[in-house]
Amino acid sequence: MNRPVARPAGGLQWGSRLSEKGYNMKTPDLLTAQDVLAAKTSREIVTTRADTTVQDACKLMRTHRIGCLIVTNGAGQIQGIFTERDVVNQLVAEDKDASDTKVGDLMTRDVIVVEPERNLSEIEAIMKQNRIRHLPVAGQGGLLGLLSIGDVLACHAATSQQMVHHLTDYIYGRY
């Protein structure tokens, strides 16, 4: 039976991508950050420098339709993370000028980074406990990608949809 694939916002095709990768029977407890990154259709990591103006950084986020930028130094090491929340809470609410304010003045410097082997349930707990929506994934080779709360929710939705499909097939004897 050929089912339509749910296509959550952000261009993710979880139903088909997870199945192609052999993850269709994995629960969120077994999925890792690496699994979720592999299922994303866009793995581009958009970065900026601390000396970029907030105005230019916001234009970059709008162009790429993303909610945050990883702030790196010349060597590509993570210095911070700059998010839409930073713009609202530290720029707009404090009446600062976006063309005069630098990303380094507003970014979060203490960035929580997870390793690719971290499971999805732990990632979700980290996001909840720290009230963050974006989580960089890094390994020995450096920055591998960025997970958003939307990625986590899309993965949960896809695994739930797959579970419903399998249970429906089981109930109606389609196995």
Image (spheres, rainbow, N blue to C red):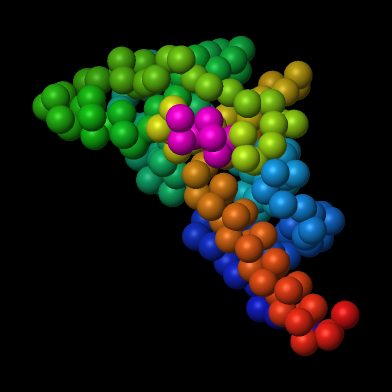
Which x, y percent locates residue 92?
17, 32
Residue 126 highlighted magenta (yes or no): yes
Left or right of residue 142, residue 96 in this image:
left
Q: Quadrant of residue 159?
A: bottom right
Residue drawn at x 59%, y 35% is 123
For the C terminus, the image quarter is bottom right
- Is 161 in front, or is 170? 170
Q: Position of residue 168 (x, y in %)?
A: 72, 79
Q: Is residue 81 above or below residue 12?
A: above
Figure label count: 0
Question: What residue appears at the point 50 percent right and 15 percent down from the top-left corner?
Answer: 79
Can you see residue 69? no
Pick the quarter of the image with the N terminus: bottom right
| Residue 78 highlighted magenta (yes or no) | no
Q: Quadrant of residue 155?
A: bottom right
Residue drawn where x is 59% and y is 15% of the image: 77
- Secondary structure predominantly adopted by residues drawn in magenta: helix
Q: Which residues are magenta?
A: 123-129
Q: At which x and y percent is residue 129?
A: 45, 30
Where is residue 162 shown, x and y percent of the image?
A: 70, 67
Q: Nearer the viewer, residue 32 or 91?
A: 32
Height in image: 102 above or below 135?
above
Q: Residue furthest front?
A: 171
Left or right of 54, for residue 61 = right
Relative to the observer, which residue lies in front, 29 or 127?
A: 29
- Residue found at the far right of this picture: 175
Front one among 151 and 120: 120
- Is residue 120 something one can see in this rendering? yes
